[in-house]
Amino acid sequence: MKKYHIGKSKLHGKGIILDRDVKKDETIFMFLGKEETVISGDWFHRPCALQVGYVKWLVPRPGSTGTYLNHSCSPSAGVKGRNKIVAMSPLKKGDEITIDYALSETYPLWHMKCNCKAKNCRKIVKPYQDLPAQRMKKYMDYTSRYILDMKLHLNWKEYMALKAK
């Protein structure tokens, strides 16, 4: 039985709305789609895609769940592993599932205007590497494996210490 339905979003058109309470770290859904390799500015024409590799994105089928995964600067969910969308805290029936798009995006030229109205809204959402270090640390457990494998969340000293082990 699904944990959600597609309904009216408070942020943008339609969104993913919970049909029941969800525990912290509980899987809400798997972000599925066709894996596409994009090596040009053509990426900008693929909204709702989830980056899973250096030039690879999962592009959801039109109308599938991933199509309705909206952004918030105060997200309710994050990415575990490659494409698992999980709750970042306990969530209640009726809550909208959102992620911070920066948690799965590293394309340096990518950015978007944000109208999420969260207290900590950044107004412009940029790729992961442009997040403040404090936010990277906060989101560590909810950042895609692809980004964590790149070690972008480490400063130079932390990276060298890890490399020395």
Image (tube, grey):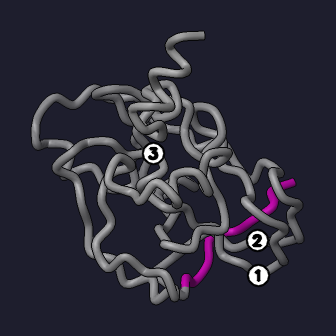
139 left or right of 29 in image = left
Element at label 3: helix
Q: Amino acid at mark 1?
A: Gly
Q: Disc 1 versus disc 3: distance between alpha carbons?
A: 25 Å
Which comes before the other along the chain, label 1 or label 3? 1
Per the model, the C-alpha gap separating discs 3 and 2 is 22 Å
- In terms of image quadrants, where is residue 165? top right
The correct choice, above or below, for 32 with respect to 25 in the image is above
Q: Which tag is nearer the camera, tag 3 or tag 2?
A: 3
- The picture places residue 62, in percent across and down from the top left corner, at 42, 53
Residue 109 image point, x, y percent: 16, 50
Left or right relative to 4: residue 20? right
Tell me the element at label 2.
strand
Question: Of tags 1 and 3, which is closer to the observer?
Answer: 3
Give the class, few, some or many, for how many residues have Cα within 10 Å of label 3's Cα (few <14, many ≥20). many
Residue assigned mark 2: 18
- Classed neighbour count for the residue bearing mark 1: other residues with Cα under 10 Å, few (<14), some (14–19), many (≥20): some
Q: Amino acid at mark 3?
A: Ser
Contact, CB < 8 Å: mark 2 with mark 1?
yes
- Percent position (x, y) of residue 102? 41, 54
Amino acid type for the residue under numbered disc 2: Leu
Give the vertical position of 46 relative to 98 (above or below): above
Q: Nearer the viewer, residue 60 or 83?
A: 83
How many marks overall? 3
Determine which residue is flagged by label 3. Answer: 104
89, above or below 66, in the image: below
Q: Which residues are magenta?
A: 1-9
According to the picture, the residue beneath numbered tag 1 turns out to be: 94
Q: Which residue occupies 32% across, 79% down?
A: 123
